[in-house]
Image: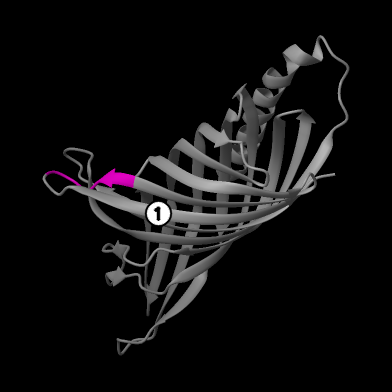
């Protein structure tokens, strides 16, 4: 129930933000015709997540990689020129290899690979400043992946056993400015700096004979800032392709230097 309240709150917040963006113009001008801009995108990311905080310092003691592959359908609407709001739906494959569960009947190091899940979200894309060939806009997006359960068999013991692995949900919030150059005929390169945070839960349930145990891991991305470089290819006023690569630096720990998470995406959009 909490996850659905979270989705509802997210949609309400984004809807309120969209209303605040367009309300000043709406008071002075007739409401323009709403244009649709549906799209299809694919995204891959590799992030480092931390878990099991130290009770004394509340600092996370362990970390492991999380890889995600997303396929998304975007339903965007241009409510006025330069203002897009939309929702998205899709499917995600999430790989949490490296999580270690120590409090089950027998400890278990998860190495079973991808688990599928349905994904929903919403976003805003708002033009802010234009000066010659340069443009700045603001973007905000929130997505939540609702994971399914993966059933595994315990084969290393004399007693029959099973494991149920479930990424209950993971969420990602992104917000920040995007700077674009519009001086080319078909291509528009861009650079963005965003707050980019991922967090979620993973629950493992183990049954060995008459013994049953369940353990939950709360994970949180160590990187919270994304730096993206990409380009928009506009073959016509009605069709565009967007390619983007993202780097997300994070501090490994005391005297351990810095690490680098990364991701990339490709999106095709049709406007009418």
The residue closer to the viewer here, 178 or 107, is: 178
x 53%, y 40%: residue = 190
Please state if 162 lies on the left or on the right of 180 as rendered: left
Residue visible at 52% across and 33% down?
Answer: 179
Q: How crowded is mark 1: few (under 14 residues within 10 Å), some or many (20 or more)?
A: some
From the viewer's perspective, is 58 left or right of 164? left
Residue at position x 71%, y 29% from top? 82
Q: Name the residue under label 1.
A: 262
Residue most toward the bottom? Answer: 158
Residue 43, horizontal then vertical, whole percent: 55, 58
Secondary structure of residue under mark 1:
strand
State the image coordinates of residue 229 (x, y, percent, origin top left): 47, 46
Residue 105 appears in view: no
- Where in the figure is residue 46, as x and y percent of width and height? 40, 58
Decide: is 209 above or below 221. below
Viewer-proximal residue among 179 and 58:
179
Q: For the view shown, which residue lies furthest in the top direction? A: 28
Q: How many labels were placed on the picture?
A: 1
Whether 217 is among the magenta residues is no
Quadrant of image for the N terminus: top right
Which residue range is magenta in the image?
Answer: 249-254
Q: In front here: 243 or 198?
A: 243
Q: Which residue lies at the image location 36% right of the left edge and 73% below the top edge? A: 111
């Amino acid at each position: 129930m909490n996850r659905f309240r979270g989705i509802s709150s997210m949609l309400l917040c984004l809807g309120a933000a969209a209303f605040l963006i367009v309300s000043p113009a709406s008071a002075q001008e007739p409401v323009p015709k709403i244009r649709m801009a549906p799209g299809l995108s694919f995204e891959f990311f590799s992030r480092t997540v931390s878990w099991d905080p130290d009770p004394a310092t509340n600092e996370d003691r362990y970390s492991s990689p999380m890889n995600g592959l997303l396929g998304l359908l975007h339903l965007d609407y241009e409510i006025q020129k330069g203002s897009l709001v939309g929702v998205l739906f899709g499917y995600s494959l999430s790989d949490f290899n490296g999580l270690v569960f120590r409090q089950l009947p027998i400890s278990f190091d998860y190495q079973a690979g991808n688990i599928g899940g349905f994904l929903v979200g919403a976003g805003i894309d708002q033009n802010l400043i234009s000066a010659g060939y340069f443009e700045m806009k603001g973007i905000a997006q929130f997505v939540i992946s609702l994971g399914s359960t993966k059933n595994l068999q315990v084969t290393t013991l004399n007693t029959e056993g099973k494991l149920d692995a479930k990424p209950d949900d993971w969420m990602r919030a992104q917000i920040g400015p995007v700077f674009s150059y519009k001086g080319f005929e078909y291509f528009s390169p861009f650079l963005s700096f965003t707050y980019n945070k991922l967090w979620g839960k993973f629950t493992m349930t183990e049954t060995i004979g008459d013994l049953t145990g369940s353990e939950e891991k709360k994970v949180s991305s160590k990187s919270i800032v994304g730096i993206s470089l990409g380009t928009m290819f506009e073959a016509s006023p009605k069709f565009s392709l967007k390619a983007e690569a993202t780097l997300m630096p994070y501090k490994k720990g005391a005297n351990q230097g810095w690490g680098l998470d990364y991701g990339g995406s490709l999106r095709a959009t049709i406007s009418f």
